[in-house]
Amino acid sequence: MVKVYTIASGKGGTGKTTVTANLGPMLAQYGKKTCILDADVGMANLGLILGLENLPVTLHEVLSGKARVRDAIYDGPLGVKVVPCGLSLQGFQQSNPDRLKDIMTDLVSEFDILVLDAPAGISRDGVIPLTIADGVILVVNPEISSIVDALKTKILTETVGGHIEGAIINRVGGSEDEFNRAQMEKLLGVRVLGVIPEDPNVRRASAGRSPIVIKYPTSRASRAFKRISADVAGIEYIEEETEAAREGFVDRLARALFRAKA
Ligand SMILES: Nc1ncnc2c1ncn2[C@@H]1O[C@H](COP(=O)(O)OP(=O)(O)OP(=O)(O)O)[C@@H](O)[C@H]1O
């Protein structure tokens, strides 16, 4: 049975596209047939992060009735399938967001998981992805404006009959141990699915047209994305050997050798 997740936030720039671009490939890696779709039809950038640009057919052509969704599916990293959206204003103007539901119906038989990157705000194109998902995942930054907008999105989702799966708290400074997960769950009234640290490698990876889980697989944010993806895929996450752990090992070994020599 296919599961449809919509990645939403309310406030713009909280990290929805980053989450979609990293969650999708990891879900595919964990054995789930996964397709990620850029439902941010006005300000699309999922294709940019994944190096999928200047494509003949995108979600714009599908939403304007000029093409079938099958023709807008491209190969992404680790076996994930991607339906990117075009960048042109004309494509946006000709798109009919009401067609999104039919598109999802066309895809359900082929995938285990569909992930929609929703636009910020509460316009019509923003509300449709909230209604068609089995679960909405809120991407929230640990700051008051983002929390307030996430709460609005939560209320809107529930008002239109949607279901909130939980929240991912993104761009958290300091260590994860210092982050007060219980307090955030109380504020938002939803389960916190994972906490992603502020990590400069996220931007570096995007500049290189790649998700961070591919470009810097052992970085802090990558490990957080892997943990969340394993949770969503329903498998146990086993922490890989990290750069830091490797460096720590080499350091300990050098000190032991030095002591043995002395
Ligand atoms: N954990 C992180 N650490 C550092 N930078 C991050 C992190 N997550 C996202 N960013 C950066 O924040 C910016 C916004 O991220 P992103 O585009 O994913 O947000 P968005 O919610 O999809 O934005 P929009 O609402 O405009 O669609 C990007 O420059 C991205 O590289």
Image (tube, rainbow, N blue to C red):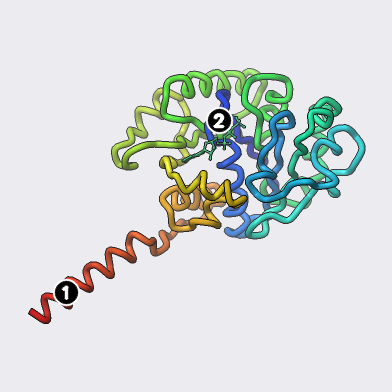
- Residue 182 pos. (x, y %): 35, 31
Question: Which residue is at the front of the view, 258 or 94?
Answer: 258
C-alpha span from label 1 to label 2: 47 Å
For disc 2, does the CB lie below 8 Å from ligand 1? yes
Location of residue 199 by image quarter: top left
Residue placed farthest to the right in the image?
A: 66
Question: Which residue is at the front of the view, 52 or 117?
Answer: 52
Mark drawn on residue 9: none
When the figure is inspected, residue 221 is found, relative to residue 139, above or below; the finding is: below
Location of residue 165 by image quarter: top right
Mark drawn on residue 256: 1
Residue placed farthest to the left in the image?
A: 262
Q: In which quarter of the image is ligand 1?
A: top right
When the figure is inspected, residue 206 is found, relative to residue 243, above or below; the finding is: above
Decide which of tag 1 and tag 2 comes sooner along the chain.
Answer: 2
Amino acid bearing label 2: Gly
Mark drawn on residue 13: 2
User: In what quadrant of the picture does the C terminus appear?
Assistant: bottom left
Element marked by disc 1? helix
Element marked by disc 2? loop
Amino acid bearing label 1: Ala
- Residue 79 pos. (x, y %): 67, 59
- Check whether the beta carbons of the residues at disc 1 and disc 2 lie within 8 A of each other: no
**Around disc 1, counting alpha carbons within 10 Å, would you say few (fewer than 14), some (14 to 19), or many (20 or more)?**
few
- Residue 43 pos. (x, y %): 69, 31
- Residue 113 pos. (x, y %): 67, 47
For disc 1, does the CB lie below 8 Å from ligand 1? no
Judged left or right of residue 74, residue 175 is left
